[in-house]
Image (tube, rainbow, N blue to C red):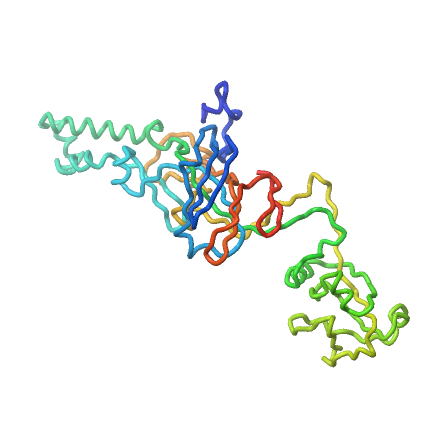
Amino acid sequence: MLNSNQILAGARTKGGIQTYVNGDYSSIPTVSVAGSTFTFTGGVEFDGQGFDLASYPFVATSLSTLLVDGNYVLSAVPSYVEPIDRTAAETLGLNYYVEQNAAQESLVHYFLPSALESSVNAAGGFNSLYKLMAMGAASGAEIQLVNSYSDALEKIADPRFVGKLFSPSGVGYVLTRVYPQNNSSRNDALVGLTNAQIELFKATQGYIAAERKIFPKANVYITGNNGGVLAKIQRAFAYSSLANANADVNAIEIKLDYAAGNTLSAPVDLNDVVILAANYSHVAVFEYYQPTYMSKGHEGTNPGVYDVYTKEDSNVLGRLNPLYQARDLEVARVSAGRGMPLNAVTKYGYPLPLAKFNLAGGVYSAATVYTPGAILPSGGIGPTP
């Protein structure tokens, strides 16, 4: 059984093997930003192991060429001890280092102690030493080298020393660039969308209902219905009187090419001829509409996601994908999901939202704690973490 800290009495969560780390808040976080440095108070837990956020500031200085202007959510994920080479690993007393391959996967390489390998190589190699010992011609030092090297080989095939599931060692951070979205039930889900958004919607639908409405002059429609969004209008017609509009006679069709700069407040006909005021007292529009309905439990106001930035994009960020054991050697072991062709030695990161902020012109601002139902800087609604 894995993660005995979650199985024994008093554990934070129930036992069981999961492919992701259980994350939660242990105390209410706060956040402040100075320049490109975010500092926190409060605490988080990963797999029942607690971490004080004050010990893990987030510095975004090196991300200036990676991030674009927009609204972001900063989330905490578990970090792990990841030495980049043998030297760094042995300084920490570890027998592995982490390498990122061309496929952007992080591979854990295990190795024998460098000093031991150097000593064996200097003495002629393990096979030569073993042959000398078998023939009774090895010195005491050479016998000791063979024994030490044999012990090391046994350890590197023992799952207690190699390939065991890593425990979180700290807190890392991932960034999510978001935009406000809301799928709450509405009479017309097209209200408030841009021309481009409505055109995309129309391109994916087989049929969209359109409703005929009459207004005195187009400027009345513009005032109450975001009339600058011409993509919401199927067709529009100008009339010299209300009676003509009601009877739909003597109509002049209005050109609706927003890319060409057409407007309803200064309409032109299909031949690009300006419609004179004398011929234009009322306008009738056939306006697209899309009513939506969901039960309350299915409605959501989670922000939409543009991009997610992780360690695969920058070393200063945390990871969501697991560390995988490189196939340098085969070890009998239990992993978090026995995947092929590589086994994971960590679970997937759980992005625990901590703060939201806005980036504009390289300036990080409006950093506030990410709380349930919190308003994003641009007015969207945040989800319940």
Residue 194 occupies quadrant? bottom right
Q: Position of residue 129 (x, y in %)?
A: 14, 32
Whether 370 is drawn above or below 228: the answer is: above
Query: Vertical placement of 217 versus 378: above or below?
Result: below
Examine the image and state in which quarter residue 327 appears: top left
Number of residue marks? 0
State left or right for residue 261 relative to residue 26. Answer: right
State the residue at coordinates (49%, 35%): 19
Say whether residue 312 is visible: no
Q: Is residue 74 above or below residue 221?
A: above
Residue 133: % across, % down: 13, 27
Residue 97: x percent and y percent?
A: 31, 40
The quarter of the picture where the C terminus appears is: top right
Q: Is residue 212 above or below residue 378?
A: below
Residue 147 spot, x, y in % from top left: 19, 26
Residue at 77 percent across and 64 percent down: it is: 221
Let me know if residue 236 appears in the view.
Answer: yes
In terms of depth relative to the viewer, which is nearer, 270 or 370? Answer: 370
Query: Residue drawn 74% across and 63% down?
Result: 223
- Is 60 displayed left or right of 88 in the figure? right
> As rendered, which of 12 and 205 lies closer to the eye?
12
Residue 85 left/right relative to 293: left
Residue at figure coordinates x 35%, y 27% from the top left: 160
